[in-house]
Image (spheres, grey):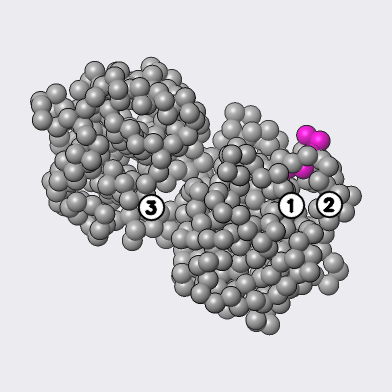
Amino acid sequence: MALRVLSVTSEAVPLIKTGGLADVAGALPAAVAPHKIEMTTLLPGYPAVTAALPRKRVVHAWDSLLGEPARLIAGKLGDAPLLVLDAPGLFGRAGNPYVDPAGQDWSDNWRRFAALGRAAADIVGGLVPATGKRRGFDVLHAHDWQAGMAPAYLRWAMPAQALPVPSVMTIHNMAFQGWQSGEVFPRLGLPQAAWSVDGVEYHGGVGLLKAGLAAASAITTVSPTYAQEIRTAEFGMGLEGLIVSRGGDVSGILNGIDTQVWNPESDPLLARRYGAASLSRRMTNKHALEAEFGLDASGAQERGAPLFIVVSRLTGQKGMDVLLETVDHLVGSGARLAVLGSGEAWIEAGFRAAADRHPGRVAVRIGYDEDLSHRMQGGGDAILVPSRYEPCGLTQLYALAYGCVPVVARTGGLADTVIDANPAALAAGVATGVQHGAVTYDSLSGALSRAVALYQRPDEWLRLQRNGMACDFSWRASGKAYADLYRSLIA
């Protein structure tokens, strides 16, 4: 008999996306399905989500869900079941799901996402007839702070007739914690017992992520290395003590990628498709990318040096400030740089200035373009990911699949997925990229120089590309790991 799991998330592709959370949440139902897991996804009813439902089959209604009327609508996310929490007073706002047009957090985010958690707890607890089936859900899976209240309600605020259901809390990025003023606690519908250092209280307020971490039966994050890093003050963001206290309840399961969407042999967005056995065809994509970014490809200066690309948020977390410091070194090596992303205004301005300083050698597109990101992975020689911390990272996984050699910081999922081209790995023929340590000028510029030197040895560079393309970063292994975890909670 299939195990039934309710996955609670604030975004999921293809319906709503602001980051990697959406990719993971959208991929999970199909990833666990081969392991006899039937996953239903619960999403907020943003305008883009409700508009995508061809028929609005209402399966339940709340007169007041944290003060707002709400309906539960059933639909499909691909081939998997979908539930949408339709509460216009909470989610009927166009644009970004979390911030207003001025870029500020919606002041009622605490109520919006607490309502999502309350609805999820009602559903898995059997208080809401949402499934149309006699048997309800076996496990609740909550993602990030926006769903953190779901395990909290399950633990502290369920009536006696509710079904006991274990929960999993997944941290996609510990930096985003959903802290709220303590004034909101009386309005959450939790008993006073939940207001404690072992409950939802966090620095005098309510920590929505912390609530989920304290209440969940198990905690996961999106790579094994990050699961260890968040036990330390450097990466735990103030919650390292809680993580340490949970001991063996905390594990890391690496994210996967959609190998149908990200496949250079079938990608319709590329100028020319190719595979590991036909890497010479990549040159067509490189020339197309040079033309698209206005990079100089006519002289001899670029010979013997790679075209580096960046597809990233332009923030300090991603190490983009240090990359800015190394741009002159990069260009001095004969290499060129194409950047796609947006983020902190001063970093955006810094890349624009670098492009002005090095016309034809550095080019920047501010914003995000999913199609362009495919073309960059298919045409760039190497991708730069110098993150100060990276829970998993998907960009380097896409790059490996496309034969775009990753140059990455040795942290989180980057450390787990890229094998450094050190002498031993090169001799063994297993290297897939270049790693560097501290995110500093010296460390990153050294990694850039190593990458340039490797590129000048074509046979070694080709081996790096083919090794990366041979890696399996599909959801196959990770889907099984999640399925095994779910089953362990009801054993």
Q: How crowded is mark 2: few (under 14 residues within 10 Å), some or many (20 or more)?
A: few
* Residue 292 visible in the shown view: yes
Q: Residue at x 58, y 51 (%)?
A: 97
Sequence-wise first label, 1 or 2: 1
Q: Is residue 475 above or below residue 179?
A: below
Read off the magenta span: 203-209
Q: Name the residue under label 1.
A: 111
Q: Residue 77 appears at what percent x and percent y?
A: 50, 68
Marks 3 and 2, how far apart in space?
Answer: 43 Å
Which label sits on residue 11?
A: none
Q: Which amino acid does label 1 sit on?
A: Arg
Q: Which residue is drawn at 14% across and 23% down?
A: 301
Q: SS of the residue at dot 3?
A: loop
Q: Mark 2 points at which residue?
A: 187
Q: Is residue 208 magenta?
A: yes
Identify which residue, 167 or 127, lies in the foreground.
Answer: 127
